[in-house]
Image (tube, rainbow, N blue to C red):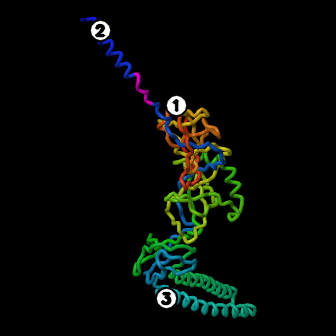
Amino acid sequence: MKSMLRVSLSVGLTLLLAACGGKDAPPPAAPPEVLVLTAATQDVPVFREWVGTLDGSENAEIRARVTGYLVKRNYQEGAVVKKGDVLFEIDPRPFEAALAEARSQLAQVKAMQVAAAAEVERDTKLFKDRAVSERDLFNSTQANESQLAKIKALEAAVEQAQLNLQFCKIEAPVDGIAGISQAQVGDLVGTGSNVVLTSVSTLDPIKLVFPISETEYLIAADYLQKALTKPLEQREEFIELILADGKPFPHKGRLLAVDLSVKGATGTIVITALAANPGNVLRPGLFARARIKTKVLENAVVIPQRAVNEVQGTYQLGVVGADGKAEIRPVKVGPRTGSNWVIAEGLKAGETVIVEGFQKVRAGAPVTAKPWTPPASHAEASTPESAPTSQPAAK
């Protein structure tokens, strides 16, 4: 009975194994599909950037130079004004009266001096005839000299009174944009108050003020000094202004000045530049980045940024070898240029780089490579030299 059971089990196992062995094994998985491109070289300009502030190329605080009541404001706030335009008027009547009084006093003393001069002339003749004493001649001469001195003093008083009357009309000292008025008609203004009536700034050209470190200054000192020896209008326009919205201003700036000394608190020295500002679009107080090309990387290996993968502060990318297998390779990156990244170490021109599908590959495994097509529009503006760099990623 036991032998029959063993035979039955043996036959059943044989039939089961035969049935299993008759089916085909499942096909191996297809290699993952990745999009690739061939690493190429190009010359890449490298830039540095510094945060700065815009200011008028000329700025004037408008203050009253005489004390009086404002009777008129003649300008439109925020409008363009020309040098010499009358912005405010102070009540001129007290100053007209003062001028009239000064002129009257001058005329009176001039008349007295004419009489004194005649007295000197008379005493001079009489002294020759010994009809008057030397003391009498001396006294009349001194009286005439005194009147002449008074005339000079009163002429100065008349001139000052004329100036005070002129100062009743407060003029723009420069061409530019006039700001919001800080005083109203009827206000008492003058030299004894700290009221700034308004301000006028020349905005075309506009001035950019930005600090650089003392180390950066020492590196660029020779170039800066050489540039400053040229007349302003002959200096190269090489400073790009990047505005708060990230867009470059269409007009570049030229070096204007380097400050006298380094600021001890910050260890920086201030640089100023001038840029054309048609239409007065840029205004004082706006922030802008000064962007300057410092060098050009010749024949740099450049690939799309999306091909580079960051792992804990290090960078790596996928490379497809001639055998169609993927390699995970650590690289050192350089500056960015538009949507691309310079690869400083770890990649050669002509190698095949995985742009999309990196997450699907395993080192040493085959892949199906298809060409990557870049998007229709790619900005190629180079980014600052301070773009992140790293040591090669750990394998």
Magenta highlight: main SS: loop
Residue 175 place in picture, x, y as percent:
57, 74
SS for callout 2 = helix
* Circle 2 residue: 6
Residue 312 located left or right of residue 337: left
Name the foreground residue: 372 vs 198.
Answer: 372
Name the kind of residue labelled 2 in the image.
Answer: Arg
93 within the magenta span:
no
Instruction: Give the Cα distance between marks 1 and 2.
Output: 48 Å
Image height check: is 363 above or below 206?
A: above
Instruction: Give the Cα distance between marks 3 and 2.
Output: 142 Å
Q: Which residues are magenta?
A: 21-26
- Please say if the residues under marks 1 and 3 sit with CB atoms less than 8 Å apart: no
Name the foreground residue: 345 vs 206.
Answer: 345
Q: Residue at x 51, y 43 (%)?
A: 356
24 within the magenta span:
yes
Which residue is at the far right? 128
Mark 1 vs mark 2: give the one in front: 2
Instruction: Give the Cα distance between marks 1 and 3.
Output: 101 Å
Mark 1 vs mark 3: give the one in front: 1
* Circle 1 residue: 365
Name the foreground residue: 4 vs 107.
Answer: 4
Dividing the picture into quadrants, the one containing residue 23 is: top left
Question: Which of marks 2 and 1 precedes in the sequence?
Answer: 2
- Please say if the residues under marks 3 and 2 sit with CB atoms less than 8 Å apart: no
Question: Which of marks 2 and 3 precedes in the sequence?
Answer: 2
Mark 3 vs mark 2: give the one in front: 2
Q: Residue at x 40, y 22 (%)?
A: 21
